[in-house]
């Protein structure tokens, strides 16, 4: 996955830096929230239930995830295609190291690999700049 950003106009949250659309960023944020609510990990069955809720439109977007808190908006049902969830949200998050999948235990976990990868990229750039 390619991340393009403008250092002068960085969004307030990391999801908007990584994902192309507001809806993708919201779904990724809800996925991480769901993982955190389940102790930082989810099995394949729980992930499938989450994807089905998105697909069926029964997952409710919390009001605090949208806009300023001046006016409390009503919760909104969120709908997102199950296949697109796996292709455009979960798979890229695994590829970037935001989420790890343990093949032995068949569990998805929140990971810090993304941070380490970006640090490594920064070091690679620093080495490139200082090459002669």
Image (cartoon, grey):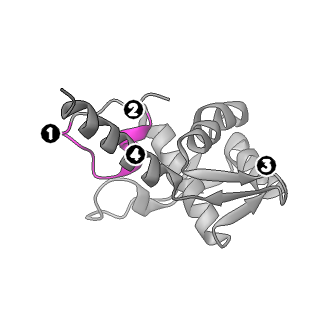
Name which residue lies at 46% across and 43% down: 25
Q: Is residue 67 left or right of residue 99?
A: left
Q: Which residue is mark 4?
A: 120
Mark 2–mark 1 distance (CA, rounded to whole Å): 15 Å
Mark 4 or mark 1: name the one nearer the start of the chain. Answer: 1
Q: Which residue is mark 1?
A: 8
Mark 3 or mark 1: name the one nearer the start of the chain. Answer: 1
Q: Residues within 10 Å of mark 3 (few under 14, many from 20)?
A: some
> Residue 95: percent from the left, percent from the top?
59, 39
Q: Farthest residue to the front: give it.
A: 132
The residue nearer to you, when weighing 114 against 66, is 114
Magenta-tinted stretch:
7-19
Q: Determine the secondary structure under disc 4.
A: helix
Mark 4–mark 3 distance (CA, rounded to whole Å): 33 Å
Establish if 31 lies above or below 82. Answer: below
Q: Which residue is mark 2?
A: 3
């Amino acid at each position: 996955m390619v991340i393009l950003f403008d250092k002068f106009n960085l969004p307030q949250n990391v999801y908007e830096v990584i994902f192309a659309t507001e809806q993708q960023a919201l779904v990724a944020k809800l996925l991480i929230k769901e993982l955190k609510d389940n102790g930082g990990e989810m099995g394949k069955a729980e992930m499938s239930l989450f994807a089905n809720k998105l697909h069926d439109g029964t997952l409710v977007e919390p009001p605090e995830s949208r806009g300023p808190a001046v006016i409390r908006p009503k919760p909104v049902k969120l709908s997102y295609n199950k296949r697109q969830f796996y292709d455009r949200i979960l798979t890229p998050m695994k590829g970037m190291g935001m989420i790890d999948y343990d093949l032995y235990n068949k569990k998805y976990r929140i990971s810090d690999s993304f941070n380490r990868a970006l640090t490594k990229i920064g070091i690679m750039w620093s080495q490139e700049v200082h090459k002669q």
